[in-house]
Image (cartoon, rainbow, N blue to C red):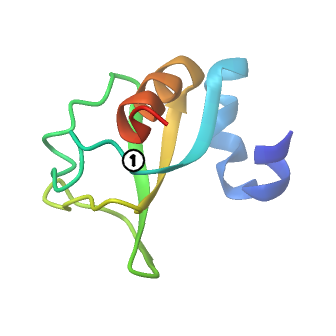
Amino acid sequence: MDNILLRPGLFSWLSEFGDGGDVSDVTVDAPVVVETTIAALDLPEGCIIGLVEQDGERFVPTPDTVLERGDMVTLLGRADTIAEARTRLEGNR
């Protein structure tokens, strides 16, 4: 329900996933992904980074976008793959 209210433009897209689709904002903190490009992340299939907020700017990343500690990324995909990607990006908190 939160995604419908907060992100109405994604409602149609999320509906295609049924109950399994999700959108989640994650703060990059894991040392193994800091200073890594989006292309090198090896995110689980079924999950993408749709937006990055870096130095106060939000943008759609390219494969060459380098993530920095403290960046906020918006993950889109299946809930199970988002959970896995969240763990990789956040590290041990």
**Local crowd size for mark 1, using a 10 Å CA cut-off: few (<14), some (14–19), many (≥20):** many
- Write the residue at 13% across / 59% down: 64
Residue at the extreme bottom? 56
Find numbered disc 1 in the image and state the secondary structure of the residue it sits on. strand
Give the quadrant of residue 57. bottom left
- Write the residue at 68% across / 57% down: 9
- Write the residue at 43% across / 40% down: 90
In percent of width and height, residue 14 lies at: 65, 35
Q: Which residue is mark 1?
A: 49
- Write the residue at 37% across / 65% down: 60
Q: Amino acid at mark 1?
A: Ile
Question: 50 above or below 42?
Answer: below
Question: 76 above or below 52?
Answer: above
Residue at the extreme front? 93
Quarter of the picture holding the N terminus? top right
In percent of width and height, residue 41 lies at: 21, 38
Give the quadrant of residue 12. top right
Depth check: give the residue in front, 10 or 93: 93
In percent of width and height, residue 88 lies at: 36, 31
